[in-house]
Image (cartoon, grey):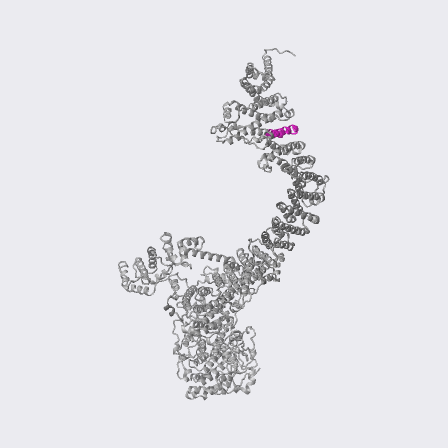
Amino acid sequence: MVDDTITESEGPPTNSTVDEELVGVRKEKPIVVDADTIHDVEDAPPSAVAAVRSTDEARPVSALPLSEIDGEHVKTASDVSHISQPEVQGTDTVVEAPLPSKQAPPTPPTKSPRLQLARGSMEVHQPRPATPSTPAKVNGHDELRPQTPSSAHSSSSASSHKRSITISKGYTVSVVLISSALEIILASKEAKRSTPLRESAHNALEMIRVGQGGDRPREIFEPLRLACETRSERLMIASLDCISKLISYSFFAEPSSAQALPSPPPSPALQGRRSIAGASQSSLPQPSLVDLVVHTVTTCHNDTSPETVSLQVVKALLSLILSPTIYVHHSSLLKAIRTVYNVFLLSTDLVNQMVAQGGLTQMVHHIFSRCRSLDSTTPRSHVSSDLFASIPVPGSPKIDIQDTSFVLSENAAEKMMAEALPLESAVDMPLYPGVPTPPSSIHDPDVPQGIISPAPPTTHDVAENERAPRELSTRDMFIKDAFLVFRALCKLTMKPLNTESERDLKSHAMRSKLLSLHLVLTILNSHMALFVDSKAIIYSSSTNEATTFVQAVNQYLCLSLSRNAVSPVPQVFEVSVEIFWRVLSGMRTKLKKEIEVLLHEIFVPILEMKTSTLKQKAVIIGMLSRLCQDPQALVEIYLNYDCDSEATDNIYEHLMNIISKIATLPYTSSQQKTNDPASPALPPQTKSSASTAHVSGALAVSGTMDTSTMGLSEGQLRRQGLECLVAVLRSLVTWGTAAGKTPAESATADTAPRSQIGEEIAADTMTPDPSLDGLIASAGSTEAFRQSTPDIADDPSRFESAKQKKTTLLEGIKKFNFKPKRGIQFLVETELIPSSSPRDIAGFLLTTDGLSKSMIGEYLGEGDEHNVSIMHAFVDFLDFRNLGFVDAVRVFLQAFRLPGEAQKIDRFMLKFAERYIAGNVQTPFKNADAAYILAYSIILLNTDAHSPQIKNRMTKADFIKNNRGINDGESLPEEFLNAIFHDIQSNEIRMKDEVDATINLPSTGPGLANALANVGRDLQKEAYVMQSNGMANKTEALFRTLMRSQRRGSRAGDQYFSASHFVHVRPMFEVAWIPFLAGLSGPLQNTDDLEIVDLCLDGFKNAIRIVCFFDLDLERNAFVGTLAKFTFLNNFGEMKTKNMDAIKTLLDIAVNEGNNLKGSWRDVLSCVSQLEHMQLISGGVEVPDGGKKGRSKKLPAEELANESRSTHITVAADMVFSLSHYLSGTAIVDFARALCDVSWEEIQSSGISQHPRLFSLQKLVEISYYNMNRIRLEWSNLWDILGEHFNQVCCHSNPHVGFFALDSLRQLSMRFLEKEELPHFKFQKDFLKPFEYTMVHNANPDIRDMVLQCLQQMIQVRVQNMRSGWRTLFGVFSAASKVLTERIANSAFEIVTRLNKEHFAAIVRHGAFADLTVCITEFCKVSKYQKISLLAIGMLRGVIPVMLTCPECALSPGVGPKGDDIMIRFWFPVLFGFYDIIMNGEDLEVRRLALDSLFSTLKTYGSTFTVEFWDTVCKEILFPIFAVLKSSQDMSRFNTQEDMSVWLSTTMIQALRDLIDLYTFFYDTLERFLDGLLELLCVCICQENDTLARIGTSCLQQFLENNVQKLSAAWWERVVATFVKLFRTTTPHQLFDESLRVEIDGSSISDLPDTNDSNDQAIVPAPLSPTGDRPQEVVKHTLGDRRRIFKQIIVKCVLQLLLIETTNDLLRNDAVYTTIPPEQLLRLMGVLDHSYQFARMFNDDKELRTGLWKVGFMKHLPNLLKQESSSAATLVHVLLRMYFDERSEHQNARPQIAERLLPLGLSVLQDYIKLRADTQAKNITAWTPVVAEILDGFCRFDNKAFVRYLPAIYPLATGLLARDVAPEIRLGLKMYFERVGRTQGIVVVEAS
């Protein structure tokens, strides 16, 4: 171990300079401090003492670089390890290991040892312990005291014990160090004059010489103290030098166990300047030695102190403060700092100023650093709160500084320091009047009592408060020291400057303000961790309440900012902005509301003020740029202010708007490009100039902006704004897109911990995160502080709803301020007001910021009952308790603006009086009326006294007179009224916002006098000062209100939310995208400065990155569209270099953001197309231009033309397409759609040019190649778009376009066909569709021919790979069959013939058999080319045998049972093809062949069909042939009525006959479908066209006769039911409709032209509808309706007769008669009987017939004679046959038969007898056969029956004898009468 005994010279010569003395005594004695201090202050600016250099150095002291003062060359312990040091026993403050730190830079070599002095105060070393030690009390703290000297010391002390002494703690100090100073003192003349000085010096010297005194520091210190009091410069220098050296050796670390000393002690000066010798014998408690030392040193300096003494004072105090073992607290600490501060202010020597400034900085650093050097877990020392008994508390007598012995001079600087750094160190001293330092007191006398009743006081740390006295740890005391120092510095910054000081940077006031501001900045810059440390607690001296450090300093810091941030002095303003930046970046989690107030009330308004300077705006923009470069801070600004409904402003949105406006400031033509710095927004650089730093008090602080080049011009400010906008976008990209990760990836990405200051992230839900403070200075990137998963509290949906709620609230406020009722309605509807109850509305009006006070007054003053109730509730919320009357009126009128109408005022004052009287018992008012009248009178007085319109103002006497007798007949006390009058006269009742707004700006009036008066005045500055004063006052008032609310415990709105989720970027961009777009596009348009252009384009790139990432359609279209317009590719002549840069940017965006461009691809690809156009034009190629004719297009400049063909642009443009295969499945669809649109635009613009623009179409083909390996799902979506485009392009009117498109399509198809297609897929079918579309829609024969050529080539080359493509091929050929060009049809048919012949099996295998048949069918239906049609029908018939033998069809006889699916797949297409030809074939011969083929095929192969397939055939093929009979809709397929008539008369009739034949052929199989056939025949019969009806009846009769033996009884029932239906349908009940017999306007139906005469020969289906047998109610018909009805009646009559004839023919057929069951015969007879009765009734009603004839029903009298006679004849014949039928069933039915037969016969005979021969010859002729058959039948009755009916028949038979009857009747009568004769016995029957 190195010997710690250090020899020293006997002292400096008396004539040596102070610096030489300092160097002489200190060059080998570095100050020894603990290592922790090194690391804590290593990065901070050290003492400027380091700048002191010897006078023989070449460089002057004032020229020292600030870097040396800034701590860059501080020597570390290792640098001075060769210097021997005293061993110092470690204390409790240095027990823990040193904190890690970065290596300090090496110290530059020095020429002189004088620098060692300055460095000595900064070089810090940890003393080495000598021996094991025991704890002892030293200076009020735990200290380790050595038991014995160290072994190393023992070994050397034998020879040199007289050269050193041992201090009580085991340290050794050189004897020479003390003795030299004592000898100087003893040798002085002052010692000879002063006995106490001489004696104490002599005693001390004696102790030193004998090796004693180490444990008696007070006796050693006494002569030094007395020497300082002599005011002798030489003695003070020697004493101070000795004191500083002794401090370095911890000589004054006095054990506190000797006596209990208060800390801080009472000032030593309080004992007065009595005899020095008797000072120590005072009965008063002695101050601690440390405090005595501080007092002694500080008293050495005053305004007249020599500079050398001042330097020694700074040196001593710096040694004391930085000592690792001697702790200076509270008042002594403040005294020491104040003294050094005064040295800086008062000293005229630049070196002293620099030393003082540096020393002050190092002291402050040390005071704050030591708070971190001790962990909070350090055991609490037994420091009782009694130690602080001497600390004055509010209300206690303060120390009178002027009475102390160290009173400074009365100059301004001394006053300033004495006020800013008082000796009291109580934490509870309030800053704002009435606002206590939190949380010492809840009561606030200045809180307005009338706004809202105060919340109950919070009981914070009650348990701590109840403990008295409180034990304070060392760290607690350190933190309190730090608070006191910071508070003092803040107070110093708040000292106002007069006008002269503002102009003079060297004035004391200005230097003081700047130094204090820089010190505050330095503290915030280096010790932010302490401010945000939740464990940093300050305990109140009076109440023991705990306050966090940040809460304690909050009010002082904020007030300092509010007063200095509006300063017109640039230096003050800049430092204030820097301080605010530290607050914003490091303390935003703690000071949420305070930051909002500062931004909203100061910094944002300054940016918007016209009177603020460019410099101020530039500095603020610079600060905002740093904010914008921190993504998390930016996001949190948005979350905590824009999404907070309690925040008065949308800070983020507002800032973006302002910055955008600044970035787009108007350009002037005179502005030239200045030498602006490269980027003001770059990371801040340390200022290098220090020439005036020591003069102004400015300190170099790391991380501050270099503002020297800011605000020089508007152009520079614009650029700053632009850079700020771009920084915002970069931060949003960094935070939102997480380095290009998808949202899912970014949510789970591994990121570094966010805490940068050793604190853990708070994970509690909805709890503020304290660890974010101070992040910005150390956070390098977003990923460095982004959590791996978002905080639970960071719920984007919650913030989104909060933002929406705030937006709605602001909208509601806006509506209210415009129209209150509408606003309230809106707010209630949106539930921002819980309900429409008066109380809820009133509470909202009272508590919501932003509402117009005038509108509140108007709304509450309305006379509606609802409004009055709201007003009452509103006033009830106000608290007037314990307020004076005028004060209550003031509080009342602050809540709203009183309306002007007297009635409204009256209602307000009535309620106010009632509320005031209810809340105050002790009032001079006897009732509420008096209060009401007086309140009204006060309003009048206020208006009268302060309104400028009133000339004759009210006097006091008038006021008293006006209020006489208002108190229930008595007058109020005159003193009371006098006080009110004077109060109103001196203090107008005004709204607070009115006071803030009434700032009169200086105006320059016209005229020479005004011009001369304003010479030399800075009007802009004056205006700014006036505005800024108002801003500062308003901000201070807001802070005061904020402090009150926080003291009441309402800090819910202060909850700070930390950001961790990337989704917040979306709403942030959505609210600010318009300012972004404006801020970027404006400069881009207005400037040609390429640097600015690059900035703008970078901003565009980042903005588009965001909009693409979050899929913001509107915003994406806006940004990409704007950037595309800036390319100027639509105006080549105006292009500039910046436009080429825009093109490059756009191409880069396309390459990088392609997956999310969506609809914006259109803009990008349009630019790429125009770029190619530009390249062609500049290359001399003639390109068709679809623009206006006669408009010449300018060529681009040659330089730009060359640039457009550069490698960069060419490669980038090509990458847009070549990298398309990297696009996502959805992105490639958007890309292709946009490219198709651009391609169509190119083609359209080319018109019919022979060289159309096909660039994009070519690129479409290329991207198809590039993307061919995509999965089929993506390809299908892609081809949906490409195929549609090819459809469009292939059909373009320009054949060159069509040929190119078809050829491209062919090439693509060939490539596609190379890929194998799995079964049941249809992609080949889809991509070949454009060929079919082209064949159908392009009428150009050449194009169609090329289509066939392309397909033929594909068939030749790729037929083996053809799968689903077969179907599209046949679709193309089918379309070709309809082409009117014969060669096209022939070519197509040839291809089909060849395919059918050569590739039938492949066609069947790949499921295209149906398509083949459809294709052949289409050729069959061609009418123009009969040859092709006949060949095609033959091909279709020939398909059947090939199909049956083809193995793929599985229809051969040897192949097992055939499922219905096989039948449907193969048989049905063929049969349906025949059906299609039958129905739609245009050639009659082809139709005939198809019909024959269909039914012959069914007959030939029908036996192999399954029943189910027969069902399908009937429903889908056979019956639909006749669908035209049922529905007229089916007639649309006929071109003309004649075509339909031909088809019906030929094809359909033959088909019906063939169908009947088929049913007969396959009756057993088709029996189940008989209902369908009967229904079909029904429909065919019930037609208005009798030709169809006759065919139907004929077919029905044919079917029944052919199958009579096969019909079962059930089927006979259905057949008879069919006949019943037919008879009912054809019965003309309308004949009895009376409405048809009413004449219309005297005209008859015969007058109308017969419009349907031409249809008499044409067959037109017209189904009949059955009519009821009851006549309908009378309806008035038109002539046209009547004619139509008459025609239907006639047709029904004809059909009825036709049915009777058919029935008669059938029943006369013996096979039919014998087969049909008798019950069905009777049922049929019933229908015939009904027909007979209907006709008989009509024929008998002559009046009816006459009426019909009259209206033109027929040209002759209508009758139904034939129907009547025919039905009767059939009835008689059938009934008689049934009656005489011997079969048992008929015999059983004989009674029923007789019941029908006899009445019928009798009625016929009766009617016949009545006929008149002269007029009814036709009737007689018709009925004669019937009568004859009746008589014959009667004659055949058996005897019993004959006799029974004889009485009824005989008279009729005799009646016939009276007529001239026909021979057959006479024969019948002969037979009858013969039978009568035999029956009655008249004639004898001869035996045979």
Vertical arrangement, residue 1260 with respect to residue 1488, above or below: below
Query: Can residue 793 be seen in this snapshot?
Result: no
Pick the front one: 422 or 394 = 422
Left or right of 987? Residue 1091 is right
**What is the magenta segment's predominant secondary structure?**
helix
The quarter of the rendered structure image containing the C terminus is top right
Give x and y (percent) for residue 1423: 64, 38
1606 drawn magenta: yes
Q: Position of residue 1006 (x, y in %)?
A: 38, 66
In the figure, is residue 161 to the left or right of 1471? left
Left or right, 1485 with respect to 50, comes to: right
Which residue lies at the image location 63% right of the left edge and 57% below the top edge?
1218
Quadrant for the N terminus in the image: bottom right
Asked if 958 appears above or below 1545 in the picture, the reply is: below
Query: Observer-nearest residue: 532 or 1457?
Result: 1457
Q: Is residue 661 visible?
A: yes
Measuring from the top left, give residue 366's x and y in whole percent.
50, 75
Judged from this view, the residue extending furthest toward the right is 1454
Q: Is residue 361 above or below residue 818?
A: below
- Give the magenta-colored segment's residue range: 1589-1618
Label count reads: 0
Relative to 980, is 626 on the left or the right? right
Tell which of 1188 and 1244 is nearer to you.
1188
In the image, 1733 versus 1186, the foreground residue is 1186
User: In the image, residue 1150 lies at what x, y percent?
Assistant: 58, 58
Q: Find residue 1793 and report its image quarter.
A: top right
Is 1157 magenta? The answer is: no
